[in-house]
Amino acid sequence: AQSVTQLDSQVPVFEEAPVELRCNYSSSVSVYLFWYVQYPNQGLQLLLKYLSGSTLVKSINGFEAEFNKSQTSFHLRKPSVHISDTAEYFCAVSDQGSSASKIIFGSGTRLSIRP
Amino acid sequence: DARVTQTPRHKVTEMGQEVTMRCQPILGHNTVFWYRQTMMQGLELLAYFRNRAPLDDSGMPKDRFSAEMPDATLATLKIQPSEPRDSAVYFCASGFDVNTEAFFGQGTRLTVV
């Protein structure tokens, strides 16, 4: 069975500082990987995804994540955060080989930005 | 701008009452998910459908919860009778496949008193 671990429940950082949100998964098969963001009182929005090809994927607002198969990780990074990045971030995984395989979400990491 | 629409956005009800939450998935999507989010449990998958057929509802308390898709434009989640422990934000999401990107609605915040 697949699982996702987000090691940090909360990450406080100063504005314009770099940030890394960690995500590790376990699976016996090839996977799809996702990062979702949830702003206060809103639903989850897809931030970026890895389906195949380049292991480094990027979002339009400066986040990037790298799929590392050997370490079973998909950490999210941003070189310089902004106040508007304050949100909860969810890592998720699904089985690539089965279109009936559901998406499994991690427990979330709350990113708080200090001015 | 295609989006998943959930109604109502907020619902306060008394214990024992029936609650119905509705979801309009994005046109063309064939997969619909229902999630529940609480501070204690995080994001839980309750049930999901593909081409209107239920694929898995093992995350749902069967005695009081039911999920249906009367047609391709409407998914419903019912709780009868409701209990205070059902208080949570319920999200509907839709997608083209079960294992690829899911598009979330804004959620229904349910409070059972």
Image (cartoon, rainbow, N blue to C red):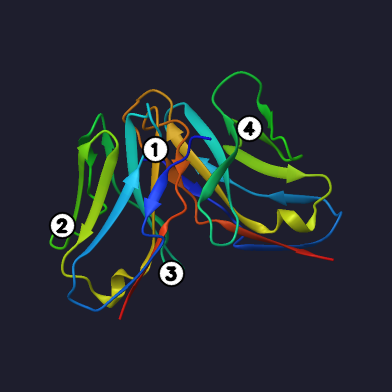
Q: Position of residue A12 (x, y in %)?
A: 74, 64
Secondary structure at numbered mark 1:
strand
Which of discs 4 and 3 lies nearer the camera? The answer is 3
Secondary structure at numbered mark 3:
loop
The chain identifier of the residue carrying mark 3 reads B
Earlier in the chain: of badge 1 and badge 3, it is 3
Q: Is residue A58 left or right of residue A34?
A: right
| Labelled pair 4, 3 in contact (Cβ < 8 Å) | no
Q: Residues within 10 Å of mark 2 (few under 14, many from 20)?
A: few
| Labelled pair 4, 2 in contact (Cβ < 8 Å) | no
Calculate the distance from the C-alpha at mark 2 to the C-alpha at mark 1. 22 Å
Residue carrying label 1: B94
Amino acid found under the numbered disc labelled 4: Asn
Quarter residue B38 falls in: bottom left
- Which quarter of the rendering shows the N terminus of chain A? top left
Secondary structure at numbered mark 4:
strand
The chain identifier of the residue carrying mark 2 reads B
Label for residue A68? 4
Q: Residues within 10 Å of mark 4 (few under 14, many from 20)?
A: few
Q: Is residue B28 left or right of residue A43?
A: left
Residue carrying label 2: B62
Calculate the distance from the C-alpha at mark 3 to the C-alpha at mark 2. 21 Å
